[in-house]
């Protein structure tokens, strides 16, 4: 039974929790009379106007606290979530493909169905016991996001390298969840020579046979950095991406016709690598895996077009000069966006397509650019005459964590000081890009 201690992290002064006598560091042992599984139980219960908490105080004594809040009022407290640990050693795990001295927070491997339900994180279902499954079903923790990779147990075991039998055979678990109405969003990270070809064909046939509970299946190419140490792994070539799309198109179409909506979707990276046009919006249904890079580019281009047609702010930046930073994968898309924005606003908009020196040339995703990558990539701007420098450089905010730090721990302020450029962040969606640019 994998219950996780729920510890109060902070209590706001004067808030509901503080008035009820709760303090940071105390442990919640029961919520409305029931022992919590984890912080998810607290978050769900916290939405109700009345809440009873049994709490273990610092000295070990137990006390009951009755919390009442009015409509819209916050409880004024936060709790920790200690994620369930991953028990696997996947060949392509990104955590293992980092430089040896990476920040500890980036080396944590979790595999937590509560985070899958709450935040859409992918899990392998390899660390569930019967009690966990019962909880998922009785509490209706739906939808869940599951990394399948292969339904063939031998192929899955070769990729995930579980220590015991758990983790090999995912199909019975998916079957059970589907039978109890848990909605499933699935992904297959495709690795050449491991789970493509016949293994992929079998996986798609068996997953679509699970019925309507399977809402989406994303096919995503494996990502590798220059720090990966498994000689048996490689990326798909552009030709292989084209062949994959040629094969997958009719398979996905047949399933879409049978279901009345698209289910199988290739991630954007396949189309960019194959230099093929992105499918239209209707191929992505309601973009169920946009956070997984499936339909992100299509959605971006379509919203950009809607903005352009709206005509608000036309010519607002005549004579201005801005720069947009992007990784190599999204480079062509951001360049298209910049041309449209430039024509519309009247400003010169430069696109700086940066390479990741840190991870190596195989990693082309914008969100993985580090502070040092940016410092190196932006250095040529500082050598230009002042009149030729962009007035402002826009950085996609996906590169920073909530503390304003890049992946290598460098802060935005520090980067501003080192580059002596006016750097500002922008959300990686067309609305924000459009509005931030026009407001510059
Ligand atoms: S499930 Fe696999 S990829 Fe995810 S953290 Fe664990 S080892 Fe890494």
Image (cartoon, helix red, strand yellow):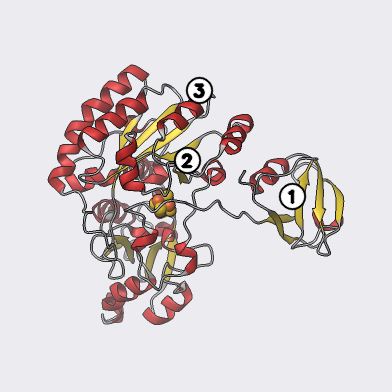
Q: Is mark 1 within 8 Å of ligand 1?
A: no
Q: Quadrant of the C terminus?
A: bottom left
* Residue 346 seen anywhere in this rendered image of the structure: yes
Which is more foreground, mark 2 or mark 1? 2
- Of the numbered discs 2 and 1, the one sitting upstream in the chain is 1
Q: Specify few, some or many for label 3: CA neighbours under 10 Å numbering under 14, 14-19, or 20 or more.
A: some
Name the residue rendered at 54%, 24% in the picture: 180
Mark 3 and mark 1: Cα distance apart in space? 37 Å
Mark 3 and mark 2: Cα distance apart in space? 16 Å
Q: Residue furthest left?
A: 239
Name the residue rendered at 18%, 32% in the picture: 247
* Residue 317 seen anywhere in this rendered image of the structure: no
Q: Secondary structure at mark 3?
A: helix
Q: Specify few, some or many for label 2: CA neighbours under 10 Å numbering under 14, 14-19, or 20 or more.
A: many
On the image, numbered disc 3 is attached to which residue? 179
- Of the numbered discs 3 and 2, the one sitting upstream in the chain is 2
On the image, numbered disc 1 is attached to which residue? 74
On the image, numbered disc 2 is attached to which residue? 125
Residue 349 percent across, percent down from the top left: 29, 62
Rendering quarter of residue 26: bottom right
Q: Secondary structure at mark 1?
A: loop
Which is more foreground, mark 3 or mark 1? 3
Q: Specify few, some or many for label 1: CA neighbours under 10 Å numbering under 14, 14-19, or 20 or more.
A: some
Q: Is 177 positioned to the left or the right of 350 in the image?
A: right
| CB under 8 Å between discs 3 and 2 | no
Q: Is 432 positioned to the left or the right of 154 in the image?
A: right
Note whether 22 is above or below 407 in the view shown: above
Disc sitting over residue 130 in the figure: none
Q: For this rendering, which residue is in front, 215 or 90?
A: 90
Q: Secondary structure at mark 2?
A: loop
């Amino acid at each position: 039974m994998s219950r996780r201690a729920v510890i109060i992290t902070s209590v706001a002064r004067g808030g509901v929790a503080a008035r009820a006598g709760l303090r940071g560091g105390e442990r919640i042992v029961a919520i409305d009379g029931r022992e919590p599984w984890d912080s998810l139980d607290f978050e769900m219960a916290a939405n109700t106007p009345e809440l009873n908490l049994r709490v273990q105080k610092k000295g070990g004594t137990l006390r009951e606290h009755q919390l009442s809040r009015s409509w819209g009022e916050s409880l004024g407290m936060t709790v920790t979530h200690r994620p369930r640990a991953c028990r696997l050693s996947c060949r392509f795990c990104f955590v293992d493909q980092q430089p040896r001295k990476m920040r500890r927070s980036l080396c944590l491997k979790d595999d937590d169905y509560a985070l899958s339900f709450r935040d859409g994180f992918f899990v392998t279902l390899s660390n569930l016991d019967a009690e966990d499954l019962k909880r998922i079903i009785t509490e209706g923790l739906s939808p869940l996001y599951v990394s399948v990779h292969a339904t063939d147990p031998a192929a899955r075991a070769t990729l995930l390298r579980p220590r015991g039998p758990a983790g090999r055979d995912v199909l019975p678990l998916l079957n059970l969840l589907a039978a109890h109405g848990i909605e499933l969003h699935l992904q297959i990270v495709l690795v050449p020579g491991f789970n493509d070809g016949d293994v992929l064909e079998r996986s798609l046939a068996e997953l679509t046979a699970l019925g309507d509970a399977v809402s989406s299946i994303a096919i995503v190419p494996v990502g590798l950095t220059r720090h990966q140490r498994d000689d048996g792994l490689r990326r798909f070539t552009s030709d292989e991406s084209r062949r994959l799309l040629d094969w997958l198109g009719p398979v996905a179409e047949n399933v879409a016709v049978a279901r009345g909506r698209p289910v199988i979707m290739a991630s954007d990276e396949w189309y960019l690598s194959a230099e093929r046009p992105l499918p239209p919006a209707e191929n992505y249904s309601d973009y169920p895996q946009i956070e997984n890079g499936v339909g992100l580019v299509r959605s971006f281009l379509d919203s950009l077009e809607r903005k352009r047609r709206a005509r608000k702010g036309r010519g607002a930046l005549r004579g201005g000069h801005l720069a947009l930073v992007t990784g190599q994968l999204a480079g062509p898309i951001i360049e298209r966006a910049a041309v449209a924005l430039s024509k519309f606003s009247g400003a010169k908009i430069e696109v700086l397509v940066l390479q990741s020196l840190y991870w190596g040339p195989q990693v082309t995703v914008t969100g993985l650019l580090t502070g040092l990558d940016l410092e190196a990539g932006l250095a040529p701007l500082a050598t230009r005459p002042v009149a030729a420098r962009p007035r402002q450089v826009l950085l996609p905010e996906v590169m920073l964590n909530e503390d304003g730090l890049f992946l290598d721990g460098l802060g935005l302020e520090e980067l501003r000081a080192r580059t002596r450029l006016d750097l500002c962040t922008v959300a990686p969606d067309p609305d924000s890009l459009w509005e931030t640019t026009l407001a510059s």
